[in-house]
Amino acid sequence: MARYGCMICGWIYDEEAGDEELGIAPGTTFEELPEDFVCPLCGVDKEQFDLAE
């Protein structure tokens, strides 16, 4: 499982944890997120995310 970070604001999506507040189940990969997924903090699309360390 990987973590992806928003390159604009730094919000992190952790595939292992998912995001309960957004209704994303634990284990959901970044690729499985809907095409219209946007950063919950700044609103940019998935193209603005990169692997986080």
Image: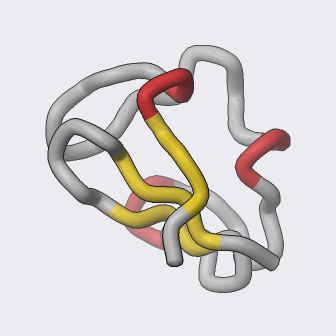
Q: Residue furthest toward the bottom?
A: 17
Q: Residue at position x 59%, y 58% from top?
A: 51
Asked which colour scheme the image uses, the reply is secondary structure
Number of labelled discs? Answer: 0
Residue 50 image offset from top left, x and y in percent:
54, 46
Q: Is residue 1 above or below residue 52?
A: below
Q: Residue furthest toward the front?
A: 53
Q: Residue at position x 44%, y 21% from top?
A: 45
In the rendered structure, the answer to whether residue 30 lies left or right of residue 3 reads right
Residue 19 image offset from top left, x and y in percent:
50, 68
In the rendered structure, the answer to whether residue 24 lies left or right of residue 37 reads right
Quarter holding the N terminus is bottom right
In the rendered structure, the answer to whether residue 16 lies left or right of residue 53 reads right
Corner quadrant of residue 18? bottom right
Q: Is residue 28 above or below residue 45?
A: below
Q: Residue at position x 39%, y 65% from top?
A: 12
Q: Residue at position x 57%, y 73% from top?
A: 14
Q: Is residue 36 above or below residue 22?
A: above
Residue 30 image offset from top left, x and y in percent:
72, 49
Corner quadrant of residue 36? top right
Residue 35 image offset from top left, x and y in percent:
68, 18
> Which residue is at the front of the view, 24 or 41?
41
